[in-house]
Image (tube, rainbow, N blue to C red):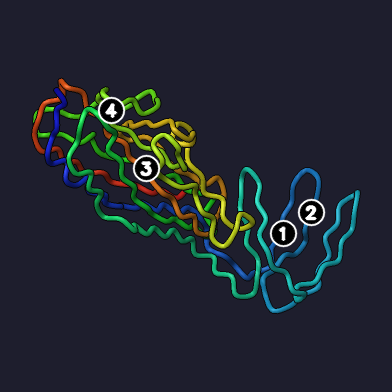
Amino acid sequence: MLKTINGLDKLLLTIASLLVVYGLGASALAQVETSSSYQIDESSVDPGSSIQSQSPHYQEAGSVGDLGVGASSSASYTQVAGFNTTSDPRLAVILNSSSVAFGSLSSASTATGTATFSVLNYTSHGYSVYTEGATPSNGLHNLNGLTSGGGSTVGTEQYGINLKQNTTPPIGAEAVQVPSGSFSFGKASTGYDVADTFRYNNGEEIAESDQASGETDYTVSYIVNISTNTPGGTYTGNQSLVVVGTY
């Protein structure tokens, strides 16, 4: 006999963001900079200048005033140059879905749902998105989360998510880079980046960018399966997406 649970009505999603900035204020005063390999007698930030830098191996005359724009980065820094470029780090998060309704559950089929959110960051060195919240419960029983990951199995109690376009079941979408992959670099994190494989662990990273990035639009895919032994009742849950900038 199939068992139906009426009332996994809503899984509420809320977003909180934490932005931590480390840095030093800029100075327009000329100064001497040295290391074991070179010495710069003067360096300045102003409308224009012509200074010389030299060491036993080279001599350089440079001027400030030519147009210089663009971004550069390494494992240790990110730099954005341009006349109208602000030095203020920025992390923006948009939650496009505030709830997911699964309706009635049956041990004969998989209940599914999706939610979308967007993240962009500027002059920080990337970001991480974490999921916070227990699996849905009826007050006494929490649905079993796919803590090690796995496929959707009808008739087995499961709760899991990923950030991919899936075929079994046919839900979800790939992350969309806005305006394109040349400027945006967000991606699903390990464990949530394989199609048809779902996972859920409270506090785990689900999305990330390892460098400054334009907007990335994410789709979170949810699956819920129950067994004939799953206690009946109304199941609800709360999930928070915590977005942290890295510097």
Where 75 sits versus 49, above or below? above
Contact? badges 2 and 1 (CB < 8 Å): yes
Q: Name the spot of residue 205 as percent of width and height, x first.
A: 41, 38
Q: Which image quadrant is residue 32 in?
A: bottom right
Could you tell me how far apart the alpha carbons at marks 2 and 4 are, in whole angstroms?
Answer: 63 Å
Could you tell me how far apart the alpha carbons at marks 1 and 3 are, in whole angstroms?
Answer: 55 Å
Contact? badges 1 and 3 (CB < 8 Å): no
The N terminus - image quarter: top left
Residue occupying image coordinates x 22% and y 28%: 107
Closer to us: 154 or 65: 154
Earlier-in-chain disc, 4 versus 3:
4
Report the residue marked by disc 3. 221
Report the residue marked by disc 1. 32
Could you tell me how far apart the alpha carbons at marks 4 and 3 are, in whole angstroms?
Answer: 14 Å
Callout 1: SS? loop
Contact? badges 1 and 4 (CB < 8 Å): no
Residue occupying image coordinates x 38% and y 45%: 220
Q: Name the spot of residue 221 as percent of width and height, x first.
A: 37, 42
Q: Name the spot of residue 77 as percent of width and height, x first.
A: 61, 49
